[in-house]
Each structure stands twice: as structure tokens, then as C-alpha cells.
Image (cartoon, coloured by chain):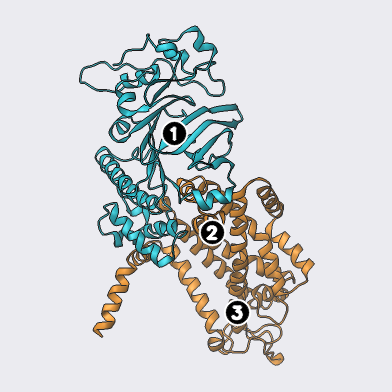
Chain colours: A orange, B cyan
Amino acid sequence: MEYLQNRIASWKEKHFSEISDAKEITHAIKKSPLTMLGFSIIMALIFVAILAPSIAPYDPIAMSLSNRLAPPSMSHLLGTDELGRDILSRIIYGTGVALKIMIIVLLIDLPLGLFLGIIAGYFGGWIDEIIMRMADIFMAFPRLILAMAIGAALGPSLVNTMIAIAITMWPTYARLARGETLSIKERAFIEAEKALGTSKAKILFSSILPLCSSTTIIRATLDMGDVIRIAAGMSFLGLGAQPPTPEWGLMVSTGRSFLVNQWWVPTFPGFAILLAVLGFNLLGDGIRDISDPHLRRGE
Amino acid sequence: MSEVLLEIKDLVINFYTYRGVVKAINGVNLKINKGEFFGLVGETGCGKSVTGSAILNLVQNPGKIEKGEILFKGEDILSMNEDDIRERIRGKEITMIMQHPIAALNPVMKNGDQIAEALNKKMGEGEARKRSIEMLKEVNIPEPERVAKQYPHQLSGGMAQRVMIAMMLSTEPSLLIADEPTTSLDVSIQAQVLKLLEDLIKKHKASVLVITHDLSIVAETCDRVGVMYAGDMVEIGKVDQTIYNPKHPYTVGLMKAIPSDYGKELVGIKGNVPDLVNPPSGCRFHPRCDYAMDICKEEKPKTIQVEADHTVACFLYEGGGSERPHTA
């Protein structure tokens, strides 16, 4: 027991700066109720996504044609859809699909954008021109339109949706990383490293990359809501998830013809999209404010 | 005569800017001997720092080394290829201390790791770590183990400069370039840092090139000094000759401009530093010089030896030098 306490004490001492950072961040989150709300929504979503099989009352794709379009009741809390599937269960399983899309898209985008951005910024010249003009071309189209075009060209499926969204999003990160790199590479410590004979690759990846990544990651948290929205939009248009996948956009799409008489069919999945996008946006804004000392209020 | 470690021969550097070609360095010659403190002084923009970075062949765009040789231990650095310089010269034979120590340390790396990284080329990781703590001890940092685990922003300016010195001396270089090493430090810390630098240099048997605009630092620490004006080396000599018995009108002017005794009037040098896109013809100092002659406007003065180990580039000393300007 004493040994364990000693171990904990020494660990605390060793990681003192990390612990105080974490304390400061939780303090800042607690001070902003909206960030707190966003954070709770996201935590709840993650929780629901992981526990979906045990908390969903029904199988999300089990049909029951005798019980189709049943209004919300005690046995089906949010009613059933046109094939008699339980809407609550489908929304619960849909959470995992939405989060999976978002995470995979950002896992492709962030490293890609960061890598291209720091290379463009550091080397400049024609490498910079090529990468940034490519980025300009992608940014010239509205994101959803471009994602739809690419998605349609690749063929409708969930994987292709992720690829399409990822292709439209890297330019934002590349631009940010490039801008940061341009200012970082002029700083004295980069010159000092050059004077020490550090190789270009090492300067690029061990000095510039970590300094660029914080801004880019914060930008990514602001984009999380967007990714979910675009993915839902593409599924709504029939380019994303295919039936019978429990995907929110798809559910709104198939339910929209029942809006007048069986309002619960499209409305509840719509609320789910709203809640998720709102949660990510609130959290993203909060993280941005916390990471920017100028915007920290009342301290 | 002591052995020559570094010799700069007829160095010419131009900067190609949108305003035109800035003739920043106009044929500089310089010798640094083994184990010596060499001071390079001059006003802001006269080319001291550019000369410093040229020694590591790190002149930044749009600057370009047009001409000249930089012989380090007899080898021309400027004709070596980039990989060779990186592997053999930078960080090994020649290292550089920067002006703002906190800015010159990588903000996302722990102090100890930075020193260890400088050493990585020479030894394994574990050994480098041990050596970095030793180096921190050597620069009189209290609790070196703790400081090694801290980040640069947790240090004061003086501490950061000592960490920098530890880092730059850890690889046992034979030449250390100190570009304004004490400018951002307050006076009491300046003295400490300079004293430390002097002691360590003696211990590690390195030479130092101190780039500064502060003549008191030169007078205090250096063995020899070079005075630069607008890209020209106007006077080189032992410190006691050059500082206390200056020959070139510019050096004389600099000495007069230092506040010394209370109540004594300060005399500045009239006029301003010339625009180096269109530098003055002949001697670049002639428009501001009290002793300017006709020949100064037409020809660039040659370097003349006035005493043993004391040269000056001025027509006043052509043929014996009778009209020498008086000292303050």
C-alpha cells in the first residue's frame, strides 16, 4: 500500500507540468457552460455508440411489417418506420456510424493536410506552388457539392463517402499548416538548429510539425460537426450509406415522405443530427477559446 | 605568431532585394587565431551578423555570397558541399550562440533533450543525456537535473543563455560564434555570462568570434577586434591598440560617442549610415568623415599596417600617417 502511494507520488512529481495543464484545462471547461454542454453531449454520444448493442431495445434492421409506422409508445419509444423497425434502436446504432465516419475522415485528413502544408511552407518555390494551387482548386468548390461529385464518381457507399469528404477537407489543414510553417521557419531556434547541423527532415518533423499541429488540431475540432453534417447530407441524397444501414441522413431521407402523417419517422433522426452537430460545434468553439489566451474570459 | 584557425579572404555578399542589390559585404578580410577572443563591432546593418552566418555558409535568401574564401583550418568552407558542411562543420567544429536565447531554444523540447540532440551526432543517446547534465553543471546552472526536464519558457534570460552556451560548447567546437550574446540580458547578468564564456573557452581551448555593437564588451573580453563600417572592415588590431589608440576616423568617432566621464559632452558621428543599394564611392565612410580628402571619394583605401598586428583601411596613413586624428 505504502509502495503504491510512493509510486503515485513520484508519478505526480514527474508529470507535474502535464497534471497542472490538465487541471487548467478542466477548470477552463467548467467555467464555460456552453463548452460543458457540448462536452457532455459528445461524451453521451460516445457512450451510446460504444454501448449500442446493450442499450438498444431492438435489432436496428429487424423488420416487423405488421407493426409499421407505429407512433411513439411505451414499447417503441420513438415509434417505428415504414418497415416496422424501431427508430430509437436505429438512432442508437446510427451514432456509431456517424462517429466512425467523422473519426476516419479526420484521421485521413489531418496527417495529409499537415504533411503537405509543412512541406509547402518549408521548401517554398515550385513545391509550394503545386501544393497550394491544388488546394485552391479544391477550395474553389463548396465542400458539399465537391464531396457529392466525388462521391457520385466513386459510387455510392459509406467508404466512398469518407474518401470524398476527406478529399475536400485537406486543403484547410494544409493552408493552416503552411501559414504556421512560414512563420516558424523564420524563428531563431530553427536557425540555431541549422547552425548545429540538424538535417532538414529532422527540423521539419521534430521542430516544425509539433508546433503546427496544435492549431490544425483545433481547427479539426471545429470541423467535426461539419463532417457529420456533410456525411448525413450525402446519405440523404443517396450517395452515402445504403439501406439497411442505420444512418441518420438515410433515415431522414426515407422518412421524409411520411412527414405529414407520421412525423416521428424523419423527425427523430433529424434531431439526432442536430444534437451531434451542435455538440461538436459547441465543444470545438470551446476548445478554440480555451487554447487562445486572448479569448479566455474572467481569469 | 599563433596559429590561424579561420581566415576570411575578400568576402563579398550581396542581397538581391526588390529595391535593388544591397552590397552588404564589400570585400572583408579577417583572421582569427587559435584560442583567441575576436570581437567584431559596428553599427546595426554594417554586416557583422551576415559575416557570422557566412562562416557557417548559412546566409539566408535573398543574400548571396558572390566572392571570397573562408578558410577554416586551411579548408575552404564555401566550396564544400552542403552535406559535408552539415556533417563536419556545423555543430561540430563551429557553433553559434544567438542573440535572443529564449527564442533560439526550441519551445517544444526540454532543455536537456536539446543539448542531447546537439550531441547525438557524436555519441549514443544515454551518454548524450548524461553529458548534457554535466554541461548544465558546467555553466553553473543550479539543479541541472530539474532544469534539464524543463522547457525553455520556464527559464530566465540569463539561464536560457547559459543553456545555449552549454549546448553550443557540448560538442567541443574549435570556433564559437557569439552573435550579440548579451544584448537581451541585463547588465549584471551580462557580466556573469561573459565571465562564464571566458572561463569555458579557456577550458575547452576554443576560439570565439563575438559579434556585438557594445564596445565595452570588446574592451572587457576580447584579444583582438575588427571594426566594420557599411560592409567594409575598417580597422583590425589588438584591443589595447585599437580601442585605446584608434586610427581610423570611424573608430575614433565611435570612441568619442561612448559616455565616459560625467559632464563631458558626447560627440556623435555626423550623418547617417549610407544606403547600401547605392553605397558612397571610394571609401564608404567619406561623406561622414572629418578628414575626407579628394582621393577618398574615388578610390577604395587599401589596408595599411600601422603597428605590429594593427591594420587600418584609410588614406590618412598612406606613407607614414602624419595627419592622424586625435583620440577622445
Q: Residue B31 carries which label?
A: 1
Say whether residue B303 is left or right of residue B102.
Answer: right
Q: Tell me whether circle 1 and circle 2 mark residues in contact (CB < 8 Å).
A: no
At label 1, counting other C-alpha atoms closer than 10 Å, the crowd grade (few under 14, some 14-19, many 20 or more) is some
**Closer to the N terminus: mark 2 or mark 3?**
3
Q: Which of marks 1 and 2 is in front?
A: 1
Q: Where residue B184 appears, x then y in whole percent?
A: 34, 39
At label 2, counting other C-alpha atoms closer than 10 Å, the crowd grade (few under 14, some 14-19, many 20 or more) is some
What distance separates the C-alpha of mark 1 from that of mark 3? 79 Å
Kind of residue at badge 2: Phe
What residue does disc 2 label? A205
**Image-quadrant location for residue A188:** top left
Say whether residue A248 is left or right of residue A7.
Answer: right
A223 lies above or below B21 = below
Q: Which of marks 1 and 3 is in front?
A: 1
B77 lies above or below B14 = below
**Can you name the residue that lies furthest to the top here?**
B294
**Image-quadrant location for residue B272:** top left
**Image-quadrant location for residue B306:** top left
Q: Mark 2 belongs to which subunit? A: A
Q: Where residue A95 appears, x then y in whole percent?
A: 58, 77
What residue does disc 3 label? A91
